[in-house]
Structure formats: structure tokens, C-alpha cells
Amino acid sequence: MNGDSATVPRHVAIIMDGNGRWARSRHLPRPAGHKAGVDSVRAVVETSAQRGVEVLTLFAFSSENWRRPETEVSLLMDLFFTALQREVRKLMKNNVRLRIIGDRLAFSEKLQQRIAEAEAETAANDGLQLMIAANYGGRWDIAQAAREVARRVKAGDMEPEGVDEHTLGEHISLAGFPEPDLFIRTGGEQRISNFLLWQLAYTELYFTDVLWPDFDADAYGRALDDFSRRQRRFGRTGEQVAATADGK
């Protein structure tokens, strides 16, 4: 593995896909796949901290996932609550700060309270920043940012002509954090699925057929190593990037 900090992504965003198919391939109920996926979360969090990743954003539950069978949604909520209870101690041990992004008002009061408690307990940690996207959608994110900007304009704090990408970006979830350098989706699907639409504008994309419960530290390491071999241009030519790297 390439441990050069210059080639390590500052921010990794992951869609954790394939839990249901993993369970079905083993003739197990879908909930078994979701529970097995928690182990992969631990492995990715630990590897991120070890490799020097600064921010890790995991897509745990999308705003569209409410359409799933009621029993599965209920189990996911229970699993989310249980994971918050069990994992905080490990996060504290590893100096990881936890934050939840998304519209949490749709969750039960009990779950909202546990989210707030977990965030407060880890607030002083200054290691890996772990973002869990729950009841999150990229379009929702942009819309809520637009509402905040509209309120500022209505209040007379700014003129409509002053609204630009920077203004809107100040109100997007994850504002103040580096945008994702690397996006990973497990499970074989090759789409973004309404995840971090604003933030992924220049992100490197990595798709793998590995199902999430099988996405261990080695599989994650391969994704990080693949990223380290890419040349990020941001609109420039390859020659310009190379010249900058050479200090010319």
C-alpha cells in the first residue's frame, strides 16, 4: 500500500451497497446483511484513521429508503440506534468525531436524542471526522441550502445578485470540510443515487462488485491505492499538473 500522505484522499465518501444481496446469496433474511455490514463500517473507519484520511462520509440511509418495506425500515432504525450506543466507546478510544447529516426530524424522538448524545460525546475528538448521512438526499441538501440563502435575501442581509456558488456552498451539508476526493460504491451498481450531488463535482469515482459486508480493510486499501495512481486535473491539462508537481 502507498502510505504517502500526498496520495491519500483527505475525504472519502462511500455508498455501502449490497447488504441485501449478500444475505440472499447465503439464504439469510435481509436483516442479516445489514447487521453484517456493521463490521465493514468498523473496518473502514479503522483503516481510514490508520491511512490518514481526514473525513469519512458514509451513506447509511437515503431519503428514498423510506420506500422500503416497513419491517426493513424499522429494523434499520433499530440497528442505527443500537450502533450509536455500542460504537461511541470505540470512537472515543480512536479519537473519532461523529456527526450526522440529513433531515433528522423524520426520526423518532428517541433516535434524535441518541444522535445528539453521540455527537456531543465525541465533539472534542480531533482525529478522523466520521459523517453519517441518514435520511439524506443530495437534492434535499441543495434545496435546504437554497432556502437558507432565500431567508438571508428576504431579511435584507444580501442582494439576489450576490448569490453565487460560494454563498450556496456555505449552507450545504459538510460546509467547511474538504469536498470528497474519492467516492466509493460497493455492490456493483455504478450510479451516485442522489448522494452528495453538490460535493461530488470533482470527485474521483470508484466502483466495485464487492458487496458491502465483504468490503474489508483489504478491499478498502485497494480503493485507496487506486486513487493514489490517478492524476487529478481540475480543468487543467496533464502537463500543467505535472509541472506543478515538479515545482516548475
Image: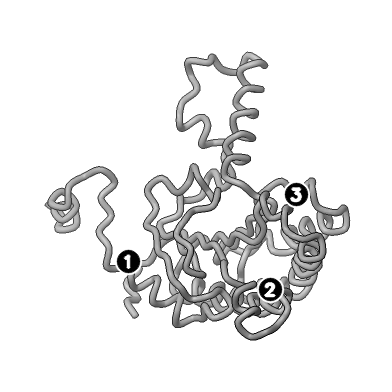
Q: Which residue is mark 3?
A: 104
SS for tag 3?
helix
Residue reaching furthest bottom?
26
Separation of marks 2 and 3 at Cα, in angstroms: 20 Å
Residue 19 vertical position relative to residue 123 in the rendered view, above or below: below
Dot 3 or dot 1, earlier in sequence: 1
Residue 165 vertical position relative to residue 95 in the rendered view, above or below: above
Query: Residue visible at 76% across and 70% down?
Result: 79
Dot 2 or dot 3, earlier in sequence: 2
Q: Where is residue 106 drawn, in percent x and y?
A: 79, 48
Picture quarter with the N terminus: bottom left
In this rendering, which labeled residue sits more in front, label 1 or label 2? 2
In this rendering, which labeled residue sits more in front, label 3 or label 1? 3
Please state which amino acid type lies under the numbered disc 3. Answer: Arg
Q: Where is residue 231 drawn, in percent x and y?
A: 25, 59
Residue 95's disc is none
Tags 3 and 1 touching, CB below 8 Å = no
Residue 216 vertical position relative to residue 191 in the rendered view, above or below: below
Separation of marks 1 and 2 at Cα, in angstroms: 32 Å
For disc 2, the neighbor class at 10 Å (few under 14, some 14 to 19, many from 20) is many
In this rendering, which labeled residue sits more in front, label 2 or label 3? 2
Please state which amino acid type lies under the numbered disc 2. Answer: His
Residue 7's disc is 1
Tags 1 and 2 touching, CB below 8 Å = no
Query: Residue visible at 63% across and 40% down?
Result: 140
Separation of marks 3 and 1 at Cα, in angstroms: 35 Å
Dot 1 or dot 2, earlier in sequence: 1
For disc 3, the neighbor class at 10 Å (few under 14, some 14 to 19, many from 20) is some
Q: Where is residue 33 drawn, in percent x and y?
A: 67, 77
Q: Which residue is mark 2?
A: 34
SS for tag 1?
helix
